[in-house]
Amino acid sequence: MSSSSPTDWLATWVGAGRAPGASGVVQIVASNAPDEGSWSVRLDDGVVTEAVAGPVAEPDATLTITYADVRAMADRSLDPSVAFMRGQLKTAGDPGLVLALLAAAGSVRS
C-alpha cells in the first residue's frame, strides 16, 4: 500500500473537475477507521475547491465507505467510480453533487 494518506490523496483533488457543475459540500465517512475517519470536499460549480480532514455540520451529500476501501482509493488500486458502481460506496443526499464529485475524482491523475 502506498504511503499516501487519504487526506493527502483528497488534497490532490483541489482544482479537479469542470464547470458548469454542482456546488456543495460532500462528507466522506470511513467505517472502521483507526484515527481520521471523515473528510469534507467542497465543490463550486463542478470544481473541487477544498478537501480537508474532519466532519462537516450540514453536508449536502454523504459518502460512506470502509476505511480499507478509502486506503485502496488513496493508493489508486480502486477507482472511486468503480467503488460506487460496485456498491462499496454508499451515498445519501444530493445525487447530482455525488456524480460531480465522482467526475472530478476521475479527472485527478497521479
Image (cartoon, rainbow, N blue to C red):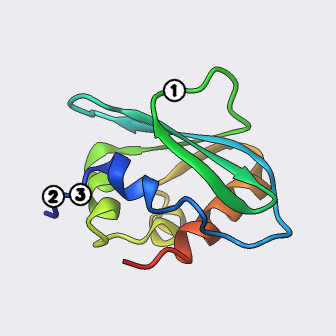
User: Residue at horizontal 45%, vertical 64%?
Assistant: 83
Q: Residues within 10 Å of mark 2 (few under 14, many from 20)?
A: few
User: Residue at horizontal 48%, vertical 40%?
Assistant: 52
Tell which tag, 1 or 3, sits nearer the viewer: 3
Q: Is residue 37 left or right of residue 17?
A: left
Q: Amino acid at mark 1?
A: Pro
> Residue 35: x and y, percent?
24, 28
Residue 88 seen in the current view: no
User: Residue at horizontal 81%, vertical 57%?
Assistant: 22
Q: Which residue is mark 3?
A: 4
- How far is mark 1 from mark 2, CA to CA? 23 Å
- How far is mark 3 from mark 2, CA to CA? 4 Å
* Discs 3, 2 touching: Cβ within 8 Å: yes
Tell me the SS state at disc 3: loop
- How far is mark 1 from mark 3, CA to CA? 20 Å
Q: Amino acid at mark 3?
A: Ser
Q: Which residue is mark 2?
A: 3
Q: Which residue is mark 1?
A: 55
> Residue 45: x and y, percent?
81, 59
Q: Is residue 76 above or below residue 23?
A: below
